């Protein structure tokens, strides 16, 4: 999601805790003042995450991305049984600050869309890694997952990106 990360960097740096509920998440997470980064997920430089389980990859935007967006008020998602292409837009997130495209971190067929986000787009803010997931994809090229960052690399990437703003 080609986020324009601006304006909220200072405010986010002052946060003492994340708004993400950790009750059902992996016990292995890396917390920073700007967001939460979970072990077991892969991350794109455009701030989407991927959880690959068996033949299904669940995709959403990261806690870091939703922190910068602010309150999400609308989500545009694709239809099921359509395709996504790595690094191409599959939807958009509108917040009180801006509208940002969501880029797919991998290619594949969309097998499920999180319909809860239509009625409750704020799930992206309150639960980006659980209830706020966006699409589930059957990857067409599982090797694309290897090009994504792990938690440590993504944490470093976010710290460097925030320092540059």
Image (cartoon, grey):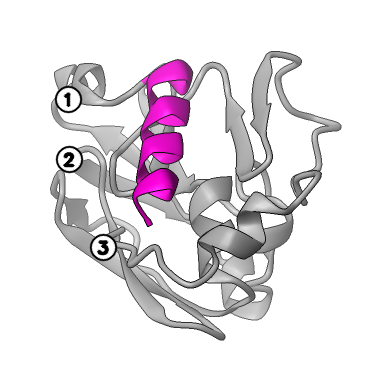
Label 1, on which residue?
Answer: 144
- The disc, 2 or 3, on the residue closer to the chain's N-terminal end is 3
Instruction: Give the CA separation, mark 3 to mark 1.
Output: 17 Å
> What is the quadrant of residue 159 in the picture?
top left
Q: What SS does tag 2 mark?
A: loop
Q: Which residues are magenta?
A: 150-165
Vertical position of residue 53 compared to residue 158: above or below:
above
Callout 2–callout 1 Cβ contact below 8 Å: yes
- The disc, 3 or 1, on the residue closer to the chain's N-terminal end is 3
Q: Position of residue 71 (x, y in %)?
A: 64, 75
Label 3, on which residue?
Answer: 90
Instruction: Give the CA separation, mark 2 to mark 1.
Output: 8 Å
Q: Position of residue 98 (x, y in %)?
A: 43, 82
Vertical position of residue 132 compared to residue 70: above or below:
above
Q: At 33% from the left edge and 41% from the top edge, which residue is drawn?
A: 137
> What is the quadrant of residue 118 in the picture?
bottom right
């Amino acid at each position: 999601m080609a986020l324009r990360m601006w304006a909220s960097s200072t405010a986010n740096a002052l946060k003492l805790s994340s708004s993400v509920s950790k009750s059902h998440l992996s016990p292995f997470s890396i917390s920073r003042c700007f967001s939460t980064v979970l072990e077991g997920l892969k991350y794109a430089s455009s701030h989407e995450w991927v959880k690959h389980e068996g033949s299904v990859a669940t995709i959403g935007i990261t806690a870091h991305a939703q922190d910068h967006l602010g309150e999400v008020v609308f989500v545009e998602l694709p239809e099921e049984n359509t395709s996504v292409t790595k690094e191409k837009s599959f939807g958009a997130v509108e917040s009180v600050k801006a509208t940002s495209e969501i880029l797919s971190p991998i290619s594949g067929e969309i097998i499920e869309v999180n319909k809860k986000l239509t009625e409750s787009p704020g799930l992206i803010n309150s639960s980006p890694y659980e209830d706020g997931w966006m699409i589930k994809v059957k990857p067409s090229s599982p090797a694309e997952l290897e090009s994504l960052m792990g938690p440590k690399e993504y944490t470093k990437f976010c710290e460097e990106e925030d320092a540059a703003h």
